Amino acid sequence: MTDTGINARHKARMERKKAHIDQSIEKADQEKGLLLVLTGNGKGKSSSAFGMMARSLGYGMKVGVAQFIKGRSDTGEEAFFARQENVEWHVLGEGFTWNTQDREGDIKTAIAGWETTKTMLQNPEIALVILDELTYPIKYGYLDEATILADIAARPSQQHVVVTGRGASEAFIELADTVSELKDVKHAYRAGIKAQAGIDL
């Protein structure tokens, strides 16, 4: 087949594809605050959430971040985003459970952290709330899942929420509008490579 024939077939395929995509876009006419769940064992859940944060800030929206479990405040994302306008950032953990080794203390910290988080979920001026690593205090029984789901469901109608963490429950998946499961295929850590600034931290 000549280049002219190949180009003509390509054009015809793209015209059909465009018509199909345009029709799908036209049908998607609802606007609402979304609940997105980023789960799975693969790397990139929080990174994806912070990518959405960058998008929101690019539109001049206000963003709130609640980081559970993590107790450190020297990550690259906080160093950058916390100093931006329109950002409310809370580190709500005392560190990973294997470091704290204090279940009772971790429960108190998680409950206090959720009270802080609720203020963001009740604020219609905050367009996006990121609940980073929220699945863990729920999985460990530090927070009551039914209460968390009810508080998220009761948020302002146009507010978006992103939840990250491994092992998202079926209840979260059912409530969510969008769920992505990241698969762990290969990780440098298992080859003895430590966490790298700008990539992991």
Image (tube, grey):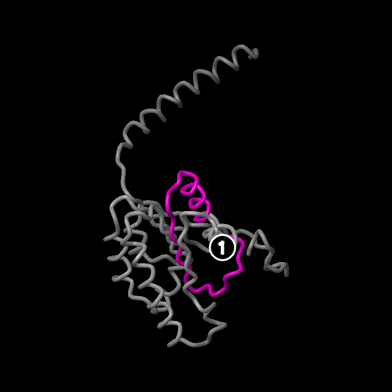
The image position of residue 123, as x and y in percent, is 33, 59
Magenta region includes residue 61:
yes
* Front residue of 192 and 198: 198
Magenta region includes residue 92:
no
User: For numbered disc 1, what is the local secondary structure?
Assistant: helix
Q: Residues within 10 Å of mark 1 (few under 14, many from 20)?
A: some
- The image shows residue 135, relative to residue 176, as above or below, that is below
Q: How many marks?
A: 1
Which residue is at a point 53% across and 18% down the rendered structure image? Answer: 11
Which residue is at a point 46% across and 44% down the rendered structure image? Answer: 59
Which residue is at a point 73% across and 70% down the rendered structure image? Answer: 192
Q: Residue furthest right?
A: 192
Residues drawn in magenta: 49-77
Q: Quadrant of the C terminus?
A: bottom right
The image position of residue 25, as x and y in percent, is 37, 33
Q: In the figure, residue 95 lies in which quadrant?
A: bottom right
* Front residue of 156 and 201: 156
Which residue is at a point 65% across and 12% down the rendered structure image? Answer: 2
- The image shows residue 119, relative to residue 32, as above or below, that is below
The image position of residue 19, as x and y in percent, is 41, 24
The image position of residue 113, as x and y in percent, is 41, 74
Q: In the figure, residue 197 lies in which quadrant?
A: bottom right
User: Is 184 left or right of 128, judged from the image as shown?
Assistant: right
Q: In the figure, residue 115 lies in which quadrant?
A: bottom left
Q: Mark 1 — residue? A: 78
Q: Quadrant of the N terminus?
A: top right
* Residue type for callout 1: Glu
* Front residue of 31 and 73: 73
